[in-house]
Image (cartoon, rainbow, N blue to C red):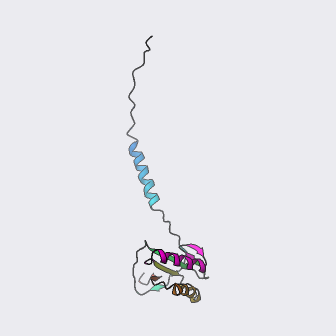
Amino acid sequence: MRLHRPPRKDFLIPLSSMSDVAFLLLIFIMLVSLINYRREVKIEYPEARGVSRTSAEKNLEIWIDREGQVYLDGLASDLEAVQDAVDEIYRGAPDTRLHIIADRNTPYRHLDAVISILQLLQYRVVSFVVKDGRE
């Protein structure tokens, strides 16, 4: 006995909606790429007389707020953790630039504690980040 099969239909993918999907993917990729993963501490920058730019790829940021709280790349930390992080980074990549970012009203004794650690470790690639005085 011979079975009769209906003729196969060719399936077509609707191409009219492909442009909509591509447009939505483009928007999604653009929005995700704009997300800033850098953690910042809200401080008031001191002003500077001169401006110099550094490469952002090899930076370690130490933030110090008015109360003397130390943040390592945006995460609350203590001086011992800063010392360990600087020591580890110096061993792995000695050309890593260290940025000290302090509030304008931070007492110097809080800055001195961080600077003393850097002197102890003999770390020489240090920048103090300030606001451009021309703004």
What residue is rendered at 50% in x and 66% in y? 37
Q: From the viewer's side, name the closer residue of 75 and 123.
A: 123
Residue 45 image position (x, y, % from top left): 50, 81
Residue 54, by quadrant, is bottom left
Residue 43 sits inside the magenta stretch: no
Residue 81 sits inside the magenta stretch: yes
Any part of residue 129 in sight: no
Measured along the vertical axis of the image, is residue 24 above or below residue 61? above
Residue 83 image position (x, y, % from top left): 56, 80
Residue 9 image position (x, y, % from top left): 39, 26
Residue 3, by quadrant, is top left
Q: In which quarter of the image is the N terminus?
A: top left
Look at the image and give the residue range highlighted in magenta: 71-96
Any part of residue 98 in sight: yes
Q: Quadrant of the C terminus?
A: bottom left
Residue 134 image position (x, y, % from top left): 41, 83
Q: From the viewer's side, name the closer residue of 13 and 54.
A: 54
What residue is rendered at 59% in x and 80% in y? 79
Q: From the viewer's side, name the closer residue of 37 and 18.
A: 37
